[in-house]
Image (spheres, grey):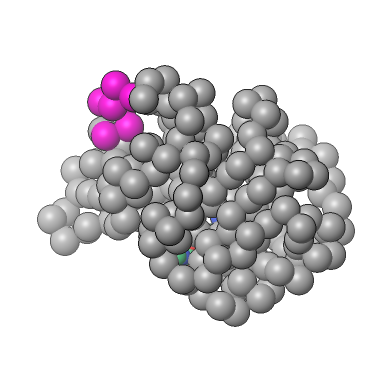
């Protein structure tokens, strides 16, 4: 629970969600026990739905941790599609790979370990969807790197853009993370290349359609 939406309302949204398969449920339990900040099932479904709506085939994910959001995306692109998984932690990548194998999507996930911004730069071609969930301090830099790499009609999606509501108040000079997100959100809405909506789901999900080159 993020505190963005009233607790009862948020619990209601989660109570409506259909039961996930055994592996996703195991990942949700692992994340809760080990404090892995995964997007959870409500945002997972949204990612899946948006990726399917635009018929995404080539997806780049920045900050994949144990691969929970990756699995929602990999299911959305279907057989023959590709999702690039990126994370700086090799232990996360090894755990993620074992989940990908178990749910049968390993053949459509490219696992890249290391700095996600560098991995994006070193991967050629355009993407239908880029999902950004790296350290928040990098968000303005990610904006500059990711938007040029999307096709027109593609989606740039970012998690945690409301940061438990902190973005709605003036941030202290030393709170570089909140300030980076505030700057990023202004960049999203001011960009003539993007059409942006922030959804107050969980910790805030920014959904941007690339509308011009
Ligand atoms: C919020 S978690 C990702 C959760 C994942 N998207 C999900 O919902 O299942 C962020 C992950 O990004 C990784 N990370 C953060 N900054 C990174 C960077 N600059 N390059 C690569 N990985 C990064 C961290 O190791 C962490 O595992």
Which corner quadrant of the image does residue 134 belong to? bottom left
Residue 132, position as x, y percentages in the image: 46, 48
Query: Which residues fall within the magenta stretch?
Result: 187-193
In the orientation shown, which residue stands out farthest toward the left? 173
- Up-down: is 208 above or below 123? above
Work out whether residue 54 or residue 208 is closer to the camera in this orientation and state it.
54
- Residue 73 in view: yes
Residue 96, position as x, y percentages in the image: 68, 67
- Residue 40 in view: no
Which corner quadrant of the image does residue 118 belong to? bottom left
Instruction: Indicate whether residue 42 is drawn in magenta.
Output: no
Disc tally is 0
Work out whether residue 96 or residue 162 is closer to the camera in this orientation and state it.
96
Seen at 13% across and 55% down, the residue is 173
Seen at 61% across and 71% down, the residue is 93
Q: Is residue 90 left or right of residue 146?
A: right
Seen at 28% across and 47% down, the residue is 140
Residue 62, position as x, y percentages in the image: 48, 55
Q: Is residue 202 left or right of residue 134?
A: right
- Up-down: is 160 above or below 188? below
Q: Is residue 9 left or right of residue 131?
A: right
- Up-down: is 3 above or below 12? below
Residue 209, position as x, y percentages in the image: 46, 26
């Amino acid at each position: 629970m993020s505190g963005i939406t009233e607790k009862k309302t948020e619990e209601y949204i989660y109570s409506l969600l259909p039961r996930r398969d055994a592996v996703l449920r195991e990942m949700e339990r692992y994340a809760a026990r080990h404090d892995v900040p995964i997007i959870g099932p409500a945002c997972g479904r949204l990612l899946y739905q948006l990726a399917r709506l635009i018929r995404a085939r080539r997806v780049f994910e920045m900050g994949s941790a144990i691969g929970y959001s990756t699995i929602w995306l990999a299911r959305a692109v279907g057989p023959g599609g590709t999702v690039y998984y990126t994370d700086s932690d090799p232990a996360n990548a090894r755990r993620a790979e074992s989940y990908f194998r178990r749910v049968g999507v390993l053949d459509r996930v490219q696992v890249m370990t290391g700095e996600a911004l560098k991995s994006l730069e070193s991967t050629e071609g355009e993407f239908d969807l880029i999902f950004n969930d790296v350290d928040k301090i990098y968000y303005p830099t990610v904006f500059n790197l990711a938007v040029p790499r999307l096709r027109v009609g593609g989606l740039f999606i970012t998690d945690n853009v409301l940061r438990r509501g902190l973005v709605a108040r003036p941030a202290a000079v030393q709170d570089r993370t909140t300030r980076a997100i505030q700057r990023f959100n202004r960049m999203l809405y001011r960009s003539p290349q993007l059409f942006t909506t922030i959804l107050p789901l969980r910790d805030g999900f920014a959904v941007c359609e690339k509308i011009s080159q």
